[in-house]
Amino acid sequence: MTMIGGPSNAGGLFLNWATTLLGAGAEPVDPARVPVWIPYPRGERVPLQDPTRRGQLIDLDLTHGPAAARRAALESTAFAARRMIDASPVPARRIVATGGGTRLDGWVEALADCTELPVHVCDVPEGGALGAAFLARLACGLETNMTDASRWARTARVVEPAPGWQPYVNERYARFCEVAG
């Protein structure tokens, strides 16, 4: 098993900020009518290593409402993850998602749609802390082997990419990469 990832500024802090600007509604969005958001108002770490990078909302027009801009924010975080996946020499088969973002259905859906991978959502959002606790038990001899972790790690649900989104998110991803560098 291989884990791919890295620290990004295009995560929870960015989405909280975007939600403050746009609200948290759940109106339906036309997959073909979403602008592209570059999610780096504080610079970016992996893979760009550029603290001076700034956010941009591009291809925005008067027909886009808050729901389309909100979806653009969600997609931008998924595009940041996709860049890391694309940079890996190992083909990805799935994403295991943990953390507070897994409580946002829209984020998990965008992650699946934008990466074209199923997203296995951990049953316990604080999976990182749970994993650290398991490793501590292992180090103390309270667990006998790494495979025992399967008792602790459960998948709450699997979110598949939604049909009809792929051609549009792939176009936006190409635009994202072109603009974000």
Image: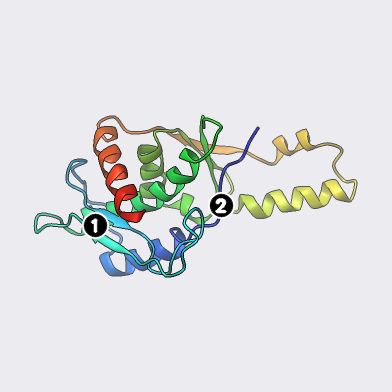
Image: 126 above or below 167:
below
Image: 67 above or below 163:
below
The picture places residue 19, in percent across and down from the top left corner, at 33, 64
Residue at 18% across / 41% down in the picture?
A: 32
Total labels drawn: 2
Residue 124 left/right relative to 110: right
Residue at 84% across / 46% down in the picture?
A: 138
Of 142 and 72, the residue lying toward us = 72
The picture places residue 59, in percent across and down from the top left corner, at 18, 54
The picture places residue 109, in percent across and down from the top left corner, at 37, 42
Chain-order first, disc 1 or disc 2: 2
* SS for dot 2: loop
Of 15 and 3, the residue lying toward us = 3
Determine which residue is flagged by label 1: 69
Residue at 70% across / 48% down in the picture?
A: 131
Residue 5 left/right relative to 35: right
Of 48 and 80, the residue lying toward us = 48
Confirm or deny contact between disc 1 and disc 2 (CB under 8 A).
no
Residue 164 left/right relative to 136: left
Determine which residue is flagged by label 2: 6
Judge the density around disc 2: few (<14), some (14-19), many (≥20) Cα neighbours within 10 Å: few
Identified by mark 2, the residue type is: Gly
Identified by mark 1, the residue type is: Ala
Judge the density around disc 1: few (<14), some (14-19), many (≥20) Cα neighbours within 10 Å: many
Residue 95 left/right relative to 34: right
**CA–CA distance between discs 1 and 2?**
26 Å
The picture places residue 173, in percent across and down from the top left corner, at 32, 44
On-image quarter of the N terminus:
top right
Q: How is the image coloured?
A: rainbow
